Amino acid sequence: MTGEEPAVICGAMPKGTRWYHTSAFGFMCLMFLVMGGIGVRVLFAAANGPMTVAAGMCMTISAGLALQIRELRRLVREYRYDGLQLRCRTLGSQTEQGWRLSEFKGLREFKGRSSGLGYRVELRDGRVVYLYSTVSNLSALVMALRADLARGF
């Protein structure tokens, strides 16, 4: 041990990107709720008619809302890495979460149709966190994480 303090890498998602994801989430929830209201209305109005279709529509909408909330809790809003632990806050949660390097299963790049969108952090307990390419200092974080994971920390 050299007695040096480890370098701390911090980053945050730009406010415009946060606003985009939050407003898209709000819009999708609003659309799901409107469709759910229509489905419930059809469900109760249809004593003899398309009851199974309306029930299926309501279940699909409920699943869509649950998936929207789950994905918002996976997108990293801000992070801090001190060489031993990655701490972050997601768009869907104000509480800070932290993981030691021993809890990491892998770090992979994920891509869209044409270019890289960011990195996917997989944890041993099955959870996944996404670091979008718009998060500041992402390349420094990825290089440090890969180096530390390769050393076996």
Image (cartoon, grey):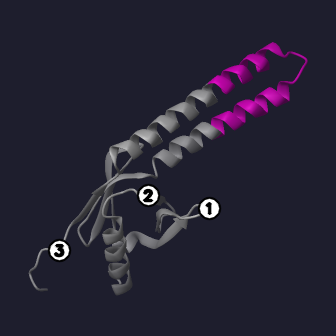
The x, y position of residue 145, in whole percent, is 35, 74
Q: Secondary structure at mark 1?
A: loop
Q: Secondary structure at mark 2?
A: strand
View extreme (right): residue: 48
Where the N terminus falls, by quadrant?
A: bottom left
Discs 2, 1 touching: Cβ within 8 Å: no
Q: Earlier in the sequence, mark 2 or mark 3?
A: 3
Q: Nearer the viewer, mark 1 or mark 3?
A: 1
| Disc 2 from disc 1: Cα separation | 15 Å
Image quadrant in which you'd find residue 111: bottom right
Q: Residues within 10 Å of mark 2 (few under 14, many from 20)?
A: many
The x, y position of residue 17, in whole percent, is 41, 46
- Compare residues 100 and 86 and report the one nearer the observer: 86
Q: Which mark is residue 6?
A: 3
The three-letter amino acid code for the residue at tag 2 is: Tyr
Query: Is residue 55 toward the left or the right of residue 92 in the image?
Result: right
Where the C terminus falls, by quadrant?
A: bottom left
Give the residue at x 78% y 20%: 43
View extreme (front): residue: 114
